[in-house]
Image (cartoon, rainbow, N blue to C red):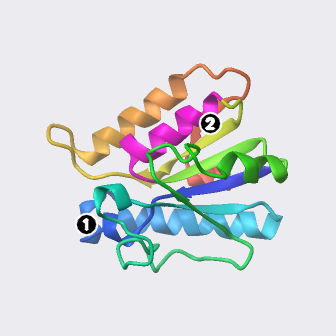
Amino acid sequence: MKALLIIDMQLGSFRPYTLRHDTKGVIDRINELSQQFRKSGDPVIFIQHDGTKENCFLPGTEDWSLLPELIRGPEDIFLSKTANDSFYKTDLQTILQRRGVKELIVTGCATDFCVDATIKSALTRDYSITVVADGHTTADRPMIPARQVIQYFNWLWSEMTPIEGGIKVETCDAIL
């Protein structure tokens, strides 16, 4: 079984929407994938950052909320995290094990922080990972435009050596 991870697609990270690279396109591709997963009976897992210790993204606030354009289903799973790594001190591993998930399809924000940390953590847990090359986003960084950050991390992940599971980077269209 496989699961779709949708990491930190929260309103507070997208004010304004133009802050992140290709926001509308990333949302549309995540929605396409999530609809396909639901039809197949595979889990869709929304992961939200709880920034209580940073005094931001406080649960229940508007910034904590998922982007309103993201389609949600009644069977979707919602998980809170307090670190970049979605596995760190969360129930993610237990949720995946109980459902027999061996493969993760990864999307979300921010490419160079929470998406990267979660992918690397999943590698050490022997999941087969597919990163959606055009399904994650970030903002411009002090010396690197967002587009280059995304291209760099897509390259980096495609070159990583998995322990048992595999890792690949594919476009949304290739996955669908």
Q: Nearer the viewer, residue 124 or 38?
A: 124
Numbered badge on residue 122 = 2
Residue at 74% across / 61% down in the picture? 43
In the rendered structure, the answer to whether residue 88 lies left or right of residue 75 reads left
Which-is-in-front pick, marks 1 and 2? Answer: 2
Residue 123 in the magenta stretch? The answer is yes
Secondary structure mostly taken by the magenta-highlighted segment of the chain: helix
Q: Earlier along the polypeptide chain: callout 1 or callout 2?
A: 1
* Residue 86 location (% of width, % of height): 54, 48
Which residues make up the magenta segment? Answer: 109-124
Q: Amino acid at mark 2?
A: Ala
Q: Which mark is residue 18?
A: 1
> Does dot 2 land on a helix, a strand or a loop?
helix
Foreground of the two, 46 or 18: 46
Whether 12 is among the magenta residues is: no
Inspect the image, locate mark 1, and give the three-letter code of the amino acid beneath it.
Thr
Q: Tell me the element at label 1.
A: helix
